[in-house]
Image (cartoon, rainbow, N blue to C red):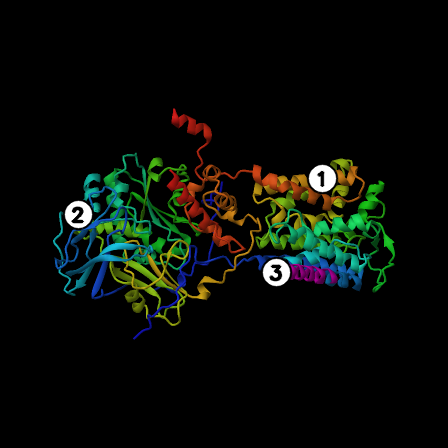
Amino acid sequence: MFFSGFKGGIHPPDRKEQTKNCPVKELEPTELMTFIMAQGGKPCTPCVAIGDKVLKGQVIGDSKEFMSAPVHSSVSGTVEKIDKVLSPRGDMAEAVIIRNDFEDKEASVGETFPVGYVSKDELIGIVRNAGMVGMGGAGFPTHVKLSTDKKIDTVIINAAECEPYLNSDYRTMVERPDDMIDGLDLLLHAFGIFKGIIAIEDNKADAAKILKDKLRSNMQIKVLKTRYPQGSEKQLIYSVTERKVPEGGLPADIGVLVFNVDTVSSMSRAVRSGIPVTRRVVTVAGLALKEPGNFLVRIGTPFWKVFEAAGGFVCQPKKIVMGGPMMGIAQCSIDIPVTKTCSGLLALTDDDIGTKEEMPCLRCGRCISACPMGLMPVVLNKLVNKKEWDEAEKGGIMNCIECGCCAYSCPSDRNPASTIRRGKSALRAKR
Amino acid sequence: MDNINVQNLTVSETPHIRSSHKTSSIMLEVFLALCPAAMAGIYFFGFRALIMIVVSIASSLLAETLYNKIAKKKNTISDCSALLTGILIAMNVSVVMPFWAVALSAAFAIIVVKQLFGGLGGNFMNPALCARAFLMASFLGKMTSFAQPMYSGLLAADAVTSATPLAIMKEGSTKGLSLLDMFIGKTGGCIGETSAVLLILGGIYLIARKIIKPHLPLTYIAVVAICSYFLGGFSVEYALMQILSGGLMLGAFFMATDYVTSPMTEKGMVIAGIICGLLTVAIRHYGGYPEGVSYAILMMNAATPLIDRLVKVKRFGEVSSWKKKEAVR
């Protein structure tokens, strides 16, 4: 039977032409680099003091919590301030601000394995020390994911990059696929399995061709139909393996682990050369920019520096978004620093966004057809507004992945995702 | 120095982009899909049909504007739903109907059926069909006297009348009925319901543009066809005649599929199609009227909230209740 992947989802114009063919350019850091302590998992506490000299790659924030990964400095210099700053999530978060001395003096690295393989425990240690978190945007500490005691038989690399505008993973695969392939190989050997799948959307078919030549014997490529949210973990696993993550469960429960392209590439660099997570590829796009492109940005660089590298604004942007347009966070300022999970910076105009005028619900059912989790957003919306929490929970509200497909497809410009989000946090508070 | 100044940034919730299919553009596309059949109505029934359409649309728009003014609300005619209701009402009446009666029924549909129930999205029955029911109840004579097609009277209300194919079939015979005529629309009937071919084409357009789903109309037509096959004595010709007449195509593709008054889920749409089909056949064969599409759809509208409540959609990764019990043990 012809299997076309997960049910539902939407097909927005992918708008990737803006930066698809822009090679990644390295961006110099600024004088003051800001390192937010909460970049994935539980927040870290600073382990340096004002006036301390730091080296590039040195740990400046750490935590004793298991669910936390350390933060490293991406420059060498002196600690100028430890203060609360505006974070990309919109809250005031503690950060270490370092005055760059532009000398890039590097910290010494721990044990490295330039060749060969590592065991699962060794990998977990290296990954944690390198401060690795899910670079696709979720920011889940990678060592926690690797520490699962469930039996794993498949590792999938999430190369779907389903959000419009974004090309950071695509450019990484086209320009530097070796790190990713090596990282996948390390993972497979650490878990003692032979099934590594790189899952990519068909709008990146050329990258798939490049990767095919580099595959090792324990890997294969699966080209999937381009649809949002193909890159969502549960949907991706289903499209690739036809296995469904049970409600309330994790991919490890069905023997699968999923990692982002950048995360796996960082794994290879950490194992082979001891390099921690200090920079990432960011796609800078949107019609408000003079020269959209892809940049290799050091963690801690303020947004304005990245926009400046893209030629600045040709017109006033209506919205600045960190991430993709479907699930990215709108920003109120461009003095906010880049974090490990910042995959894209968009400067959107009215032409990018379109106009919105909320109208009454037509009961057309498009939100139901679009929901990749098989929920009924129009019904959940009503239940949340009526504060009927038990019915909402029975209706599966906690399974909402907040992808925004319902709001995207609504012809009356309503936003059920927003109400459902509020309902979920109300339910969590009640527990 | 490149410009990196920002001001007045909008900070709002995800998602930041939306589909370009909006309510008003959807209504306009349905209107467009109706135009070929409307033009066929004008061709067959004369200039008076065009005036009927204009009067009906104008009355709908005026009624909505007046209501909004009196209720001190922003005028909602820009959502194009009144425009659509207007043309549907005109297509559902016989060309001999007096203009003032149609205007009155349009006002009834917009003000009473739609606006008083909360405006767009609030009505629980199809406004255009309620207008038709209003006219059936109040102007039965005019509603059931249909003009012969191609009579070429301009404004005269006393055209040569003829029976509709369904009325003839109810008498028990199919003499003088041509399948081809019914397919093209050269039969007696309401202005917009006769030209089956153009209505089907309009329906296919809407399905291809993903404005309506095929589940409701196709189930509806299939049920009527199958039941008529048996009731007509295993006659394929009879089944075809039944589905090509009586405004079934207009009802199935354009009236039953109205978002507000039909189920939201695909399973629900199939159930609604079956209900409409069975009711249409029942009214046509065992009821007092020769045609039953409008009442069948109105009854389906009434059943829709219940259908929506009962139909459950399969969730991703849903753990069935017995599996949950196993896990607890």
For mark 1, what is the residue? B279
Q: Secondary structure at mark 2?
A: loop
Extent of the magenta region? B55-75
In terms of depth relative to the viewer, which is nearer, B266 or A395? A395
Same chain letter for marks 1 and 3: yes
Q: Quadrant of residue A246?
A: top left
Q: Residues within 10 Å of mark 1 (few under 14, many from 20)?
A: many
Secondary structure mostly seen in magenta is helix
Whole-angstrom CA distance, mark 1 to mark 3, is 41 Å
For mark 3, what is the residue? B72
In terms of depth relative to the viewer, which is nearer, B262 or B108? B108
- Please provide percent x and percent y for residue A419: 46, 48
Mark 1: amino acid? Leu
For mark 2, what is the residue? A115
Chain letter of disc 2? A
Q: Can residue B154 be seen by looking at this rendering?
A: yes
Chain letter of disc 3? B
User: Would you place residue B7 above or below residue A73 in this image?
Assistant: below
Whole-angstrom CA distance, mark 3 to mark 2, is 77 Å
- Please provide percent x and percent y for residue A413: 51, 56
- Please provide percent x and percent y for residue B310: 57, 37
- Looking at the image, which residue sits at the far bottom? B1
Horizontal arrangement in the rendering, residue B324 relative to residue A179 (left or right):
right
Whole-angstrom CA distance, mark 2 to mark 1, is 75 Å
Chain letter of disc 1? B
